[in-house]
Amino acid sequence: MTLKKKLLLLAAMTVLLFLSGCLNYTQVTTLKTDGSGSMFVHYWTELDNPEDSLFINRLGIFNADSIRKEFLSDYLTIDEIEVYRDFRDSTIHAKVELTFAHFDSLNLSPVFRASKFSILNGPEETKIFSQFIMPFATGFGINREEFKVRYIYYLPGEILEHNAVDVSRNKLTWEYNLEEIGSGKTITAVYRPFLLKETPKWIYLLCLLVLLIVITFLLKKRKA
């Protein structure tokens, strides 16, 4: 059973097992112009009684070895996996940091096989980014608004179009509860990439300043 399927099972069985807290999922992805990048995944839930802990342990979604197996792929590098309990608020957390050489290759990781990561060429030298968010079948009358997912992307270019809920320069944020996701949702954005080898303007200004200083020094030396 993949990690994503286990997360779905956790959501579906929550009421039956009297988990009183909500499930939260955050994914932060930074893309570079050449298609490589990094990702940080953090998900957590509340554990208010021993039954919660037993069920979580059986699922394995907060077990470092199980997490590594689900994220493992020849096309990405897992930099760090951290699982811990926070007894101040009775929560359990899992964090994963990874890097990848090609964005599309994330689809080959078991946990992401249904996510449809994609960057396509658009008109006028633009790029079209997209990722599919799978539906979560909770059932049993559970309050779907208590389950939160957040996706944050730093795209390497000027944002032209998007369906994000918040944008700040090249940072885009999508945040939904399960009711809003419904039968699945595709997050997408169109951007014009930054020039891969563009030289910052301050470099030219610095070179000009150095040149002026040298010329001034030489003129003073000649007059002397």
Image (cartoon, grey):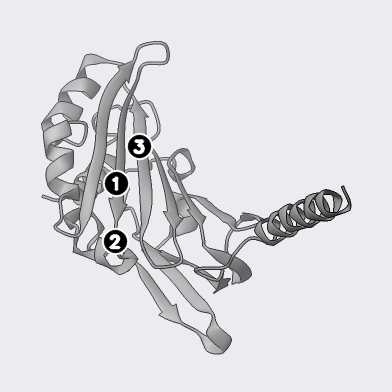
Expressed as whole percent of the image width and height from the top left, the position of residue 155 reads 51, 61
Q: Which mark is residue 101?
A: 2
> Marks 2/3: CA distance?
24 Å
In this figure, which residue is indicated by the disc labeled 3?
A: 43
Which of the pair 186/220 is nearer the observer? 220
What residue is shown at x 32% (from left), y 47% (from top)? Answer: 138
The amino acid beneath tag 1 is Leu
| Occupied quadrant, residue 115 | bottom left
What residue is shown at x 55% (from left), y 71% (from top)? Answer: 195
Tags 2 and 1 touching, CB below 8 Å: no
Expressed as whole percent of the image width and height from the top left, the position of residue 222 reads 83, 54
Q: Is residue 11 left or right of residue 125?
A: left
Q: Is residue 215 left or right of residue 177?
A: right
In this figure, which residue is indicated by the disc labeled 1?
A: 98
Sequence-wise, which precedes: disc 2 or disc 3?
3
Question: Could you tell me which secondary element the residue under label 1 belongs to?
Answer: strand
Question: Could you tell me which secondary element the residue under label 3 belongs to?
Answer: strand
Sequence-wise, which precedes: disc 1 or disc 3?
3
Residue 13 in view, yes or no:
no
| Occupied quadrant, residue 191 | bottom right
Q: In the figure, 129 relative to 43: above or below?
A: below
- Of all residues, the one furthest to the front in this rendering is 224
| Occupied quadrant, residue 59 | top left
The amino acid beneath tag 2 is Ala
Front label number (2 vs 1): 2
Expressed as whole percent of the image width and height from the top left, the position of residue 194 reads 56, 68
Residue 135 in view, yes or no:
yes
Q: Which mark is residue 22?
A: none
The amino acid beneath tag 3 is Tyr
Q: In the figure, 179 relative to 89: above or below?
A: below
Which of the pair 203/102 is nearer the observer? 203
Which of the pair 96/61 is nearer the observer? 96
